[in-house]
Amino acid sequence: MPTPKKCLYSHTFNIYGNHAFVCAKFNKTELHNRIRVLIFAETAPYSELVASQADVACEPVRLLPQHPLLRPADISLRVVPGALTVSFAHIAVDVTSIPHAPALTDPNATDDAYLTSVIRHHESNENKKFVG
């Protein structure tokens, strides 16, 4: 069995990485931004959904006509016509990370009020991105 990973402050990560969400020294924004950049700069241009890097936008505005200044997506892909079996002009990608909460998916798991509250808070904030 592999040795459990530890943060810089010697706290052990479980298999879900939950410690990253409660460690006061761990920067969750940096994790989000690194994932976004990986998708934006490295992956999307090779997906065959876009013609070139110019068809990939990071945190674009004007995706929602009723709220043109909001940036509800981390990445927007301008899809090559015919790349999908359905007709989409754009695909919006939102990078998000929340801790694993077994209490929400496993009826036999012990309820973890903290993780449940984190997920509810996160969902609430994500939903606000679409209503202004």
Image (spheres, rainbow, N blue to C red):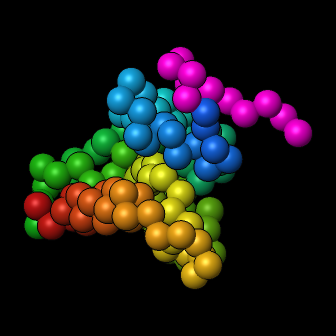
Task: Look at 42% across and 28% down and name the residue there.
Answer: 26
Q: Main secondary structure of the magenta part?
A: loop
Pick out the residue farthest to the front.
110
Task: Look at 50% across and 19% down and name the residue there.
Answer: 9
Judged left or right of residue 58, residue 111 is: right
Q: Nearer the viewer, residue 47 or 108?
A: 108
Q: Does the magenta stretch include residue 16?
A: no
Compared with residue 19, is residue 127 higher up or lower down, i.e. above or below? Answer: below
Pinpoint residue 54: horizontal percent, then vertical percent: 45, 36
Q: Does the magenta stretch include residue 9?
A: yes
Compared with residue 47, is residue 3 higher up or lower down, i.e. above or below? Answer: above
Compared with residue 15, is residue 23 higher up or lower down, i.e. above or below? Answer: above
Judged left or right of residue 42, residue 1 is: right
Task: Look at 68% across and 30% down and name the residue there.
Answer: 5
Q: Can residue 47 be seen in this view?
A: yes
Compared with residue 92, is residue 58 higher up or lower down, i.e. above or below? Answer: above
Pinpoint residue 103: horizontal percent, then vertical percent: 51, 71
* Residue numbers of the magenta segment: 1-11
Pinpoint residue 11: horizontal percent, then vertical percent: 55, 29
Disc tally is: 0
Q: Looking at the figure, which quarter contains the N terminus?
A: top right
Pinpoint residue 61: horizontal percent, then vertical percent: 22, 48
Q: Looking at the figure, which quarter contains the C terminus?
A: bottom left
Pick out the residue farthest to the right.
1
Task: Look at 17% across and 52% down and name the residue there.
Answer: 70
